[in-house]
Image: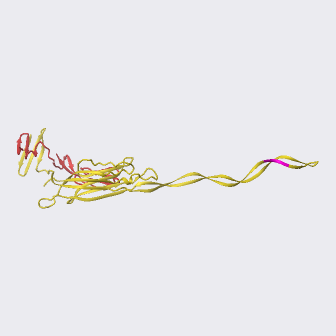
Amino acid sequence: MAVVLSITPSRFRASGSKLDSQRRYIRKGSSGVDFKFVTGKNMDVSGGGLRYVNPDGNNVDDGVYNGSFSGSAGIGVKV
Amino acid sequence: MSKFEANNSRIRVIETVSGVNQTVFDTVDDMPHIVGTAQVNSQTVDFATMSQTKHFYDVVCWTEQECSHVQEYVCDWEFVCGYEYVCGGYPYECEFVYVCNNEHVCSWQWVWQCENVTVCANRYRWAIDADENSSTVNIANLPTDETGSTIDVDFIVVQATGSRTRHGKDPRFNQALPTTVPTKTFSFQGSVLLESSGRANGDSWMRRIMSVYRSGSKIKMRVQESIAQLNRDAFDVSFPHAADTRSTYTFNFKVFFGKFRQ
């Protein structure tokens, strides 16, 4: 039977362990983030080249790209 | 050790690892969650055949010897010998004498006449035409809540299954353009590079990409192709596989709509 609520000195569990202190639940963060959710188009092509906008919002060009696309930074999350 | 706090409108779970408190769960934080999905099937992505054009490159000249067989009136000194009837002397006598003389002899003769001539010709190079193509289509609507209002999602995750149904070739070679689309289901956010090709020095000259993203209340699929002019190395020879450069993909998407806070 699923655990409804279990509280011990070393572990907290609730709702059939959907919430479990031994898991890592990701949550939005503004600093010290572990990775980012990309929220839009993050590549563009022009002049035969490619621009990739990394999750931090920085442009990474291949040396050929000659367009002006600007993507946006993703949403940072902490684990 | 773990700690659970329920305080007014906040629930927080903290796990202590090596003496450091780490937040495992906190209702104050915005936590990503999925608020809806949409299945979008049979989306076709088509990249048209590339065109090529013959361009003037330069003029090259070289020297050739041009000869013709002509009739010419040729005169020459010839040493001609023969008997002559010579009379003279005292007593007067006549006799046959063998005499040789230089004589000027002329006649029509066939001779070769040659001259150096400069010959020039235009040189042409074929090139794949530079081109920029894009198309955007709406493939889904954002989900709605129980009142019918559109949910303002923060992000989407796309799970895609697709295949290339027409394998476009590199115009220079009898081989398909490399594709990055795996044969199995893959997930992405934002954009995906579908095909690319490089010059001999490694510089890119062609890119084909696909993007799936939110725009207003719609989920859009944008397909883009960028082609830089690609010159053929050899002169007066067209690209052998330019007519085979069309690529086509078919995708099924499952779009997951996500929010960080209700």
Residue B40 colored in magenta in the image = no
Of B239 and B233, nearer the camera is: B239
Of B103 and A20, nearer the camera is: B103
Expressed as whole percent of the image width and height from the top left, the position of residue B7 reads 5, 49
The answer to whether one can see residue A51 in this image is no
Expressed as whole percent of the image width and height from the top left, the position of residue B179 reads 31, 49
Of B70 and B226, nearer the camera is: B70
The answer to whether one can see residue B11 in this image is yes
Considering the whole magenta stretch, tell me its main secondary structure: strand
Expressed as whole percent of the image width and height from the top left, the position of residue B13 reads 9, 45
Query: As drawn, which residue projects farthest toward the right?
Result: B91
Query: As drawn, which residue projects farthest toward the top?
Result: B18
Residue A6 placement, left or right of B241: left
Determine whether B7 is above or below B218 in the image: above
Expressed as whole percent of the image width and height from the top left, the position of residue B17 reads 13, 39
Residue B109 placement, left or right of A23: right
Q: Indicate the quadrant where residue B118 lies.
A: bottom right
Q: Indicate the quadrant where residue A2 lies.
A: top left
Instruction: Give the residue at x 59% y 53%.
Output: B117
User: How many discs mark residues in the rendered view?
Assistant: 0
Determine whether A20 is above or below B253 in the image: above
The hue in which chain B appears in the rendered picture of the protein: yellow
Instruction: Give the residue at x 30% y 56%.
Output: B46
Residue B83 colored in magenta in the image = yes
> In the image, which residues are magenta?
B80-84
Location of the N terminus of chain B by quadrant is: top left
The hue in which chain A appears in the rendered picture of the protein: red
